[in-house]
């Protein structure tokens, strides 16, 4: 397959960019009025104007791309591979939004670090060093203490890695979310009206997994990990007026393989958070994954939240997923560097912009649960016969909700 070939189900060359080049009001985007719609402002509080130098004068404007990096604990190192693929394919990111570990990687990227510099940070990071038990305080305070681990070392590391004290000074607009413990509302640091805090403080708040790290006071409030309610900030990305959203979700798990039960408090807590996060994220994806979103899910579900993984392997998995998805998806393929796409094409068997729906009709009981669960009409609620409506579902939200909901485990999704 060459860059000029059209992948199965993809739009013809030019059509993907033509779709993206249309304004929401139907007008064509050039370097005139369209560019003025993203009025210049101060720092990260303004929506960036498109990079006119990257397109020919008078031609279609480059779409505004927002990169959304989800939470996932140590799985988050795979975000570095996603950024490396974006760099390799020549895509230009205008804004970055991160949650939990995604805010760490996103913050470094927004500060101007490339994927190789961020990898050096990851290699210097040690779970053993930054996740130390608060045994003494537990002995003294018992359950009156706020966290299992000491957060001081992790907090101080963030201050070193992210020294900027003002969101407006970052090279790219950056936002991260955290959940208020006093109001229950979601706070998006970096937005106008949000508390003015240091980047490292905001990222620490976004990473404060309850019971793991102790919440720190910020502007008179206390915050915990934003992933407790919104592990992938697609809602904010849409509100920023993005033409194209590249999102990396790390919540995927292999539901065909049982997780061994361990009668330990950390295992029960972390696994419960995982299951709750999957359920919450299902609703998030069903509502906000649309025709503007390219959703990637690196195969890192086997990594625990606080495991000590092989960083280079996680980066490789993230890069591989992003290269396959971005170089074959009809929204991004024709925005990528042609030479890079041609190189990636040699190793890809089929496009990744659709999901294959398969149902074992010997196991199917035609209960209709799949049809009700699927947000994109992939299944039909029929009393008899095949229930698959879209063998190749290009709108699939990739949350595997239909698989989890099927009472007889008859559904298998492929090409995820």
Image (cartoon, grey):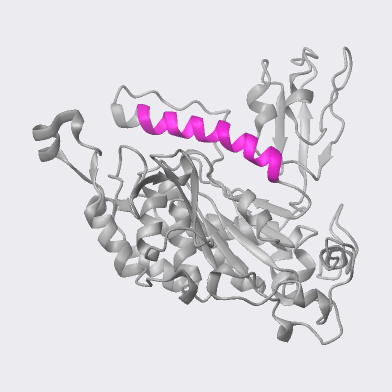
- Which of 337 and 15 lies nearest the eye of the viewer? 15
Q: Which residue is found at the position 50% from the left and 60% from the top?
A: 193
Magenta stretch: includes residue 410: no
Query: Residue 329 appears in which quarter of the rendering?
Result: bottom right
Number of marks in picture: 0
Residue 312 figure quarter:
bottom left
Q: Is residue 43 left or right of residue 268?
A: right
Q: Is residue 50 above or below residue 79?
A: below
Q: Is residue 272 magenta?
A: yes
Locate residue 252, reporting x and y percent. Answer: 56, 40
In the image, is residue 364 above or below residue 75? Answer: above
Main secondary structure of the magenta stretch = helix
Question: Which residue: 42% across, 43% down?
Answer: 180
Specify the quadrant that holds the C terminus. Answer: top right
160 relative to 168 in the view: left or right? left
- Image quadrant containing the N terminus: bottom right
Q: Is residue 289 visible?
A: yes
Q: With respect to residue 30, does 403 lie above or below? A: above
Where residue 282 appears, as percent x and y from the top left, is 62, 35
Query: Which residue is at a point 44% across and 33% down the rendered structure image?
Result: 273
Magenta residues (range):
268-288
In the image, residue 301 above or below residue 51: above
User: Residue 42: image x %, image y %?
Assistant: 56, 76
In this view, the residue in front, 193 or 145, is 193
Q: Nearer the viewer, residue 243 or 193?
A: 193
Look at the image and tell me whether residue 347 can be seen. no
Q: Position of residue 51 (x, y in %)?
A: 69, 80
């Amino acid at each position: 397959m060459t860059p000029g070939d059209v992948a199965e189900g993809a739009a013809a060359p030019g059509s993907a960019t033509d779709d993206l080049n249309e304004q929401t009001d139907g007008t064509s985007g050039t370097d005139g009025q369209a560019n003025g719609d993203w009025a210049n402002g101060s720092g990260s509080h303004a929506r960036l104007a498109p990079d006119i130098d990257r397109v020919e004068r008078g031609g279609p404007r480059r779409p505004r791309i927002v990169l959304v990096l989800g939470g996932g604990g140590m799985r988050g190192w795979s975000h570095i591979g996603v950024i490396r693929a974006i760099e390799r394919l020549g895509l230009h990111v205008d804004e970055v939004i991160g949650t939990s570990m995604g805010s760490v990687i996103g913050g470094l990227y927004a500060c101007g670090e490339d994927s190789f510099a961020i990898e050096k940070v990851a290699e210097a990071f040690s779970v053993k060093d930054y996740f130390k038990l608060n045994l003494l305080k537990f002995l003294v305070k018992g359950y009156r203490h706020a966290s299992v681990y000491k957060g001081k070392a992790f907090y101080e590391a963030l201050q070193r890695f992210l020294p900027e004290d003002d969101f407006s000074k970052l090279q790219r607009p950056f936002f991260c979310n955290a959940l208020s413990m006093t109001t229950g509302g979601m706070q998006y640091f970096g937005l106008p009206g949000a508390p003015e805090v240091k980047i490292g403080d905001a990222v620490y708040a976004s990473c404060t997994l309850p019971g793991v790290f102790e919440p720190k006071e910020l502007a008179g409030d206390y915050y915990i990990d934003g992933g407790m309610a919104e592990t992938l900030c697609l809602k904010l990305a849409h509100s920023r007026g993005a033409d194209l959203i590249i999102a990396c979700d790390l919540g995927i798990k292999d539901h065909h393989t049982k997780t061994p039960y361990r009668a330990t408090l950390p295992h029960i807590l972390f696994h419960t958070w995982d299951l709750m996060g999957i359920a919450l994220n299902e609703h998030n994806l069903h509502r906000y994954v649309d025709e503007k979103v390219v959703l990637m899910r690196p195969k890192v579900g086997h990594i625990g939240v606080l495991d000590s993984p092989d960083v280079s392997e996680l980066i490789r998995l993230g890069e591989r997923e992003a290269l396959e998805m971005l170089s074959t998806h009809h929204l991004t393929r024709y925005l990528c560097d042609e030479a890079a796409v041609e190189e990636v094409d040699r190793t890809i068997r089929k496009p990744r912009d659709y999901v294959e729906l398969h149902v074992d009709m010997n196991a199917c009981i035609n209960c209709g649960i799949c049809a009700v669960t699927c947000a994109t009409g992939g299944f039909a609620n029929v009393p008899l016969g095949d229930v698959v409506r879209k063998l190749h579902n290009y709108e699939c939200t990739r949350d595997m909700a239909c698989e989890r909901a099927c009472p007889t485990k008859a559904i298998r999704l492929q090409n995820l």
